Amino acid sequence: MWNITQDLEMKQIQNWHNVLSFSIATNRSVKKWDNWEDKATFHNIVAWGKKAEAISNFFSKWKKILLDWLLENRSWEAEDWTKRYKTEILLENFYFVQSKSDNSNDEFAKTDKQTFWNKNKSEEISVEDIPF
């Protein structure tokens, strides 16, 4: 479960495909001398299509989100003819997270979340699908 740390940025590319970019923060504790300190690392996420649309409709900066992702490496040749590389985090799936502190005045109605969730239940896996 992560916090969205920037405003969501939706773009449309070729053939009207939606692409959403946003960042999340992961936190870990590191020991510095005799004290433990929290260290945040920021990650850029890319989502496509219907998932991009849903996230842009139901989430915003500082909201919590649970993500399944995969890493993808890509390379290209820059204008100065040097080879460039980038690792991107591509969203595979996301899940709604509601904390006990959320109140009923949340901008996203519980019924909207349930409607979206029910439409996407076909993407769920069963225990039998897990290979180990």
Image (cartoon, grey):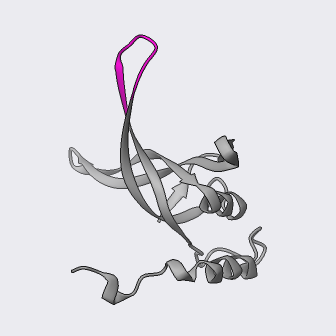
Task: Please give the name of the residue rendered at 43% of the width and 18% of the height, measured from the top-left corner.
Answer: 78
- Residue 1 percent location from the top left of the image: 47, 66
The stretch drawn in magenta includes residue 132: no
Q: Is residue 67 left or right of residue 30?
A: right
Task: Please give the name of the residue rendered at 41% of the width and 10% of the height, measured from the top-left corner.
Answer: 80
**Among all residues in the image, which is located at the extreme front?**
15
The stretch drawn in magenta includes residue 78: yes
Q: Is residue 103 left or right of residue 84?
A: right
Image quadrant of residue 114? bottom right
**Among all residues in the image, which is located at the extreme top?**
80
Residues in magenta? Answer: 76-85
Task: Please give the name of the residue rendered at 60% of the width and 75% of the height, measured from the top-left corner.
Answer: 98
- Residue 96 percent location from the top left of the image: 58, 72
Image quadrant of residue 60? bottom right
Foreground residue among 11 and 15: 15
Foreground residue among 28 and 4: 4
- Residue 48 percent location from the top left of the image: 58, 54
Quarter of the image that includes the C terminus: bottom left
